[in-house]
Image (cartoon, grey):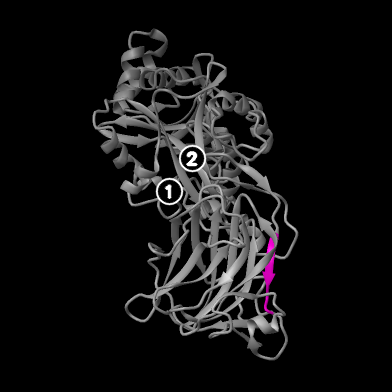
Amino acid sequence: MMKKYIYLIMGLSLFITSCNPMDDIFEEIDAQENPIVGDAVYTLTDANYTESMAKGGLGLSFTSFNSIDDAKAKLPAFLSNKYPVWGQGSSALISYNLYIGNAFKLSNYNLKQADYTLSGSNLLGFKFDATPENYLGGIITSNISNPKEGDYAVAKYYQFTGSAYTVTPKVSLKENFDYGTTAGNLTGVSNSKWTAHSGSGSGPIGYAASSLAMTNYPSSNVGGSITMSSSGAEDVNSFLDTPITSGKVYASALVNLSDTGNGQYFFHLMTDGTFNYTARVGTKDNGSGKILFGLGASSFSNPTWGTTSYDLNTTYLLVSSYDIGTGTCNLYVLTTAAATEPLTPEATNDGFSGNVIDKIAIRQGSTPTATIDGIRVANTWSALMTNEVLPDVVIGDKNSKETFYKYSDGTWKIPSANFYSLTDEDFASMGLTSFGSSTSQDNYLSKFLGIKFPYAQEGDVLDVMYNYVSSSSGAQTRGNLYTFTNGVWVAYKSTISTTQQFGFESTGWVPDNTIKYEFVKADYDLIVSTFTGNAEYANAVANLKSFGNISTFNWTIAQFDAAVNVVLKKKFPGMAEGQKFSATIYIYDGKSRNAVFNYILKSGDYIRN
């Protein structure tokens, strides 16, 4: 019975001694169920951005956030998955990639027919004598919406180098040698569609029932073919259905050679009743048993020989052309049909202009032994390569050009300073033709600009434009701002690394600007020196001085908060309204221990949060 009284007295004693001015501060702390509190400093990886939310990732398409608000909205769920057992009082400082936009916007604009019409051109390009800059500013203004100061636009356009015109594609001869299944002489089996103009009946050109083939060529593997020999003497020709009197003439044929002959021409265009032979195609041995194809325009006394070696007993598609206006002839050698005329011919030769073309001819005499099939003559390349009806095409040489404009003071102007656009020669100096995914500009431009501008001064800026070829978007013009910093040209970064702090409040993670700070001896000394001499704080200061901690038996709540304000304002001056602090303070509440107190800055004072 005596033991029970002793326990009762001890319980009353504990109740009486536990009463102190700061009980209210600790009621909430004591009521918590001892949550797991953690502090994390974490940098997001590429996988964190792109992995699905089900796998603990953010489920984004890119490895950056588009805005700070975007990060604040998405990161709490990520933190809940990453730290599932952490609770109230936990914090996480997350480093992440933030897209802040490009230094300037660059718009690529390709002129349309309506734009060229403004200059009086009814073709897809400015006339050769037009001044594009007289029109481009207005065209850009009409087609680039909502520009901002400092934006760029590149106008991409064509300009003809001389006169140009439209033509309706038309095939003037389509010869598939479809003359039955019996071999013979060409002039006989064709019923005189082909006639001899030299060496009639002597070593005649023959007809075979078999044909030649070429992928995507419309006169492939149709009817028979013709055969010719280096020992033959007969030369033959056939009229076009319609003579071609202007523009360009294109002639194509499938050719398979078993020998090269002695360097003579065997295929050419012809004007009726004259010896105006044009675009003479010939062959010779390259010195090692392979074929070189050559071209003479008005004669074959000084032909242009190609540099590519071709194989015997192989079918090639030969295409020759004659520009009636200039006299220039070109030769192309193809292994598969091409929908558009290649940029570079195998051979080019110049001759007389003005010939009317109304015949195609085959010549023998020291010429190759060959099979020829699928001859076509037309006024455009496109008509050679299809049997379909084609829309009108423009004939005329034109150059691709571009002019840059900068939006400044409310108008588009050609930039005159702090601007540079890389040229083809610049790319060639780097061993490139453009930048791309495997040849990033980041690996080249800083060094290139250092060489190009050796006298750059600290802080100089340069808007740099360059060609970029993307597998998804094709060829385009891109640009960036470069600043000369510490002796190096540094590119503006559209994506930066930044941080965001989060805190765990109540039931989840929320964006938080809380600064965690643990008081040190100098802070307690500051409190003592600040309140020494203040009678209201005499007991509190004396206790702190003696024991080095803040006793909950000696400091009131108001005094405690005043001491915290002294330290935070001294240590962290200039904090913005709403700044939060989580302060770890050494206290005595029956035992000496560290305790955490949360504050927020409102109207110039830190108040309990």
In the picture, the quarter occupied by the C terminus is: top right
435 is higher (above) or lower (below) than 174: above
Residue at horizontal 71%, vertical 49%?
392
What residue type is disc 2 on? Arg
**Main SS of the magenta segment?**
strand
Residue at horizontal 39%, vertical 39%?
422
401 is higher (above) or lower (below) than 83: above
Q: List the residue tagged with mark 2.
A: 478
Q: Identify which residue, 327 or 497, lies in the foreground.
A: 327
SS at circle 2: strand
Relative image position of residue 568 (x, y in whole percent): 41, 22
- The label on residue 178 is none
Q: Identify which residue, 439 or 485, lies in the foreground.
A: 439
What residue type is disc 1 on? Phe
Tell me: 105 left or right of 300. right
Residue at horizontal 34%, vertical 35%?
490
Residue at horizontal 53%, vertical 16%?
409
Q: List the residue tagged with mark 1.
A: 435
SS at circle 1: strand
- Give the Cα distance between marks 2 and 1: 10 Å
Q: Find residue 174 and report its image quarter.
A: bottom right
Q: Find residue 39 and report its image quarter.
A: top left
504 is higher (above) or lower (below) than 289: above
In the rendered image, is residue 558 in sight?
yes
486 is higher (above) or lower (below) than 472: above
Badge 2 vs badge 1, beta-carbon distance below 8 Å: yes
- First to last magenta residue range: 171-177
29 in magenta: no
